[in-house]
Amino acid sequence: MNRRQKQGYITAIAAVVLLAILPLKLGSHSVLSLLHLDVSILSEMLLFAIAAMSVNLLLGYTGLMSFGNAAYFGLGAYGAGLSIHYLNMNFIEGAIIGTAVALVGGLLVGPFLLRRRGIYFALLTLAFGQVFYFIAYRANEFTGGEDGMSFPRPYFGFPGWHMDLQEGTFYYLMLLVFAAVLVGFWLIVRSPFGRTLQAIRQNELRVRYLGLDSNKFIFVALLVSAAMAGLAGALYGLLIMFAAPLMLDWQQSGDFVMIMILGGAGSIWGPVVGSLIYVIGKDIISTLTQTWQIYIGALFVICVIAFPSGLLGTLLNSIARRDVGAPISEEAAPHKARESGAPAGNAAVAAEQKES
Amino acid sequence: MAEALLEAKNVSKHFGGVVAVNSVSVTIEQGSIYAVIGPNGAGKTTFFNALSGFYIPDGGQVLYKGQDITTMPNWQRVQLGMSRTFQTPSIFPELTVYENLLIGVQSQQKIAFKLRLPSAARKKEIDARIDELLGFVNLVHLKDRPVAELSHGSQRLCEIAMSLSVDPTIVLLDEPMAGLAEAETERIMRVIRDLHDRLGLTVLFVEHNMRVVLSLADHITVLDRGAMLAQGTPSEISNSQTVREAYLGQEVLNRV
């Protein structure tokens, strides 16, 4: 295990432990209650983090701007809500069906999205997202239309064992799901598949000229992203026991993009930090003033200008710079090659390179 | 008689009303170093792009080992054994030299789509292959540097190593000397010769530096304004009256 990996493990464990002890009471107070926060806000934070991670997989890793991930998020919420409302599904079934519905959404839309890149890709995701929005909005009798639909939160469990999910236990379940998603995400981005996605972000043409069908990779990335957003949406629906067209809306997609950019695109923890700031910040500021959106907007503008690679990204970059120290110049390196016994011809080439 | 590896039959390509390449035919035999030359705007790069699948030609056929690949997607051509470089090195700028090559080696080993990390034995095999490729272009000492930090010449060498990482039969080089200093040109020339002599690869390259072309290539096609002007060995080309008159005169006659 190298040093960076070790740091990664330590960060992950520390973060999860910290998140786990936040709601715990010491005497009559917990950290949360001192901040006047409800435990459900932490659940929301984790679920928005998962949704922002789904955008991050596309933009931060594959280089595809998605303004439509709320579509999958909303499909997840409706999938869970409708299956619970009409089919009496339990919690786990509702979450799985929600995720599956979002995945089917991705399967339907994906082949069209694959045909475009850049700004046209972004516009297509936006357009398809609005298609789902209007379907939910229009299908009054089935979805409750503009008002949305309420549904109960079923027992969590399976035949033979179940438990009632209060806000506290719900949060710990979300923490488990979040940890699992985080591990899964980490495994994906460091796998050969994930490395190829990152290569596509930098130079898709070169990926194709290395004999790889980039569309196949992008399609799978879209599906993984849709499933992640769908899972987050299904669980969010179960958290607030409600599904509404606004969850599918482009503004919701914009929130996910904003969360990701706040924290830092292209890093595993960026969206988590972004979600922490966004969700908690929104909660705190909105108790102080009705015009909280102005302050969140101002915060976002400041962040983008002052920390273009996100709050976490900027922090990590400054740490990395300190780690490496002064950059080694390319010219200094050939000497090493010569010392280590490179053939004389190579040394001559190295000398040439030094001149040029 | 060596067999034809890559053939173009009456390949044409136009952009709107402009005919960039007009019915050009070449036969590249296995084991040759083939150059396509011509003045700026002669259609060299367009022709080259039509062969490598960057463009689909409007007319004519492209054959690889006798198989019609005229409309085959570029990534499939690479799998058949054709790899290429670009006039401006096409690399992954933020990745290190090692990681740049890793993407290619993963592709060649058919593991790019895997979610599991390669086994320790496989990883050793991959690393050995990358070291071998870097040794070939003499970039081992820059292995862990982001490619964006490298000099232009080193970036080009890295790209050549990437194009080798997929185990090609023929390497297509688009103006490999473009924008390089004299010393770096020598370096790339040596690598191109090594591609042929040491690795036994077939090489097709587009170039306008006549000195490079005459000293490297064994077959040359001269293009002018999208059409084929002459074809032959370096001595035939440099002695051809048509070529002299139309294009070489000013630049080459006083050098050769």
Image (tube, helix red, strand yellow):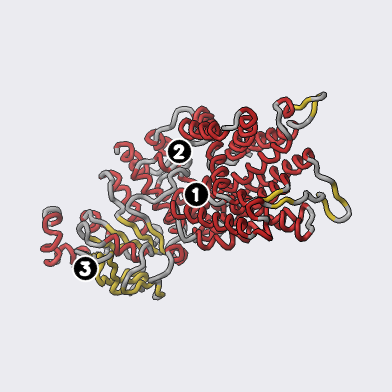
Residue in front for this viewpoint, A156 or A130: A130
Residue type, label 2? Ser
Q: Are marks 2 and 1 in contact (CB under 8 Å)?
A: no
Tell me how far mark 2 sits from mark 1, CA to CA: 46 Å
- Compared across the picture, whether A347 is left or right of A269 comes to left
Q: Residue at x 26, y 72 (%)?
A: B23
Neighbours of disc 2 within 10 Å: few (<14), some (14-19), many (20+): few
What x and y, as percent, mark residue B247?
15, 60
Q: Chain of mark 2?
A: A
Tell me how far mark 2 sits from mark 3, CA to CA: 51 Å
Look at mark 3 in the image and give the residue it sits on: B227
Q: Chain of mark 3?
A: B
In this rendering, the count of numbered labels is: 3
Look at mark 2 in the image and give the residue it sits on: A340
Residue type, label 3? Ala
Provide the secondary structure element on which disc 2 rests: loop
Residue in front for this viewpoint, B9 or A263: A263
Look at mark 1 in the image and give the residue it sits on: A65
Residue in front for this viewpoint, B151 or A31: A31
Residue type, label 1? Met
